[in-house]
Image: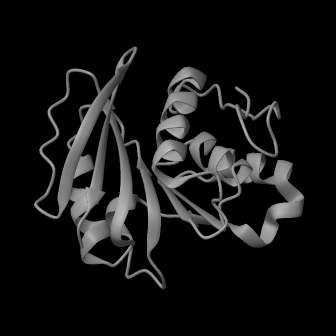
Amino acid sequence: MRIIGGKYRGRKLFSPDNGKVRPTSDRAREALFNILRSRLGNDWSNFRFLDVFAGSGAMAWEALSQGAAVVTLVDADTGPLLKNASLFKDEKAKIRIIKSPAQALGVADDGYDILFCDAPYHQNLTVPVLCRLAEKNWLRAGAWCLIEVAKDEICPLPAAFVLLEERRYGAAKVIIARYQG
């Protein structure tokens, strides 16, 4: 698994082989970041990126490589995140890792402009976590939300989220939405 674009393009990431982490494919990451760049432009220096159920953190590391101002990674198991964070020593001030189940997050200090949420498939965690993120001020009004679920999984978005489109990548479906806050 490698960074596919930006400042750290080509940098190899650690991928845990414990069977618990299912990293978003390189193809899907590239496509999703192309979609975001087409809507947000190439200057990401003012964007705050939140990666929930981060796993290896591939999406957040990609956002960091694209120039995001801050990347915050949330997972109950931060081992893989800390290992990958060590590859970005020059960016330490931009990286925040939170060891917590996503459904237990407290109130945020500041909201985020872009969310990537990739809950374990078929465990009915996505919708409750989206509601919690909204309730606890983790998202800024207008935030772009990339929500990965299994391609056959039904994910009704909470009222504050507006569906823009859905894309399929292998076994995954990515819901692209905006948070109306």
Rendered-image quadrant of the C terminus = bottom left
Residue at 27% across, 22% down: 151
The vertical placement of 71 against 148, above or below, is below
Q: Is residue 110 visible?
A: yes
Quadrant in the rendering for residue 94: bottom right
Residue at 72% across, 35% down: 3
Residue at 26% across, 68% down: 132
Way the structure is coloured: one colour
The vertical placement of 100 against 123, above or below, is below
In screen coordinates, is 89 left or right of 125? right
In screen coordinates, is 163 left or right of 34? left
Q: Position of residue 168 (x, y in %)?
A: 33, 21
Rendered-image quadrant of the N terminus = top right
Q: Position of residue 67 (x, y in %)?
A: 71, 57
- Which is more toward the observer, 63 or 101? 63
- Which is more toward the observer, 118 or 113? 113
Q: Position of residue 159 (x, y in %)?
A: 10, 61
Q: Residue furthest top?
A: 170
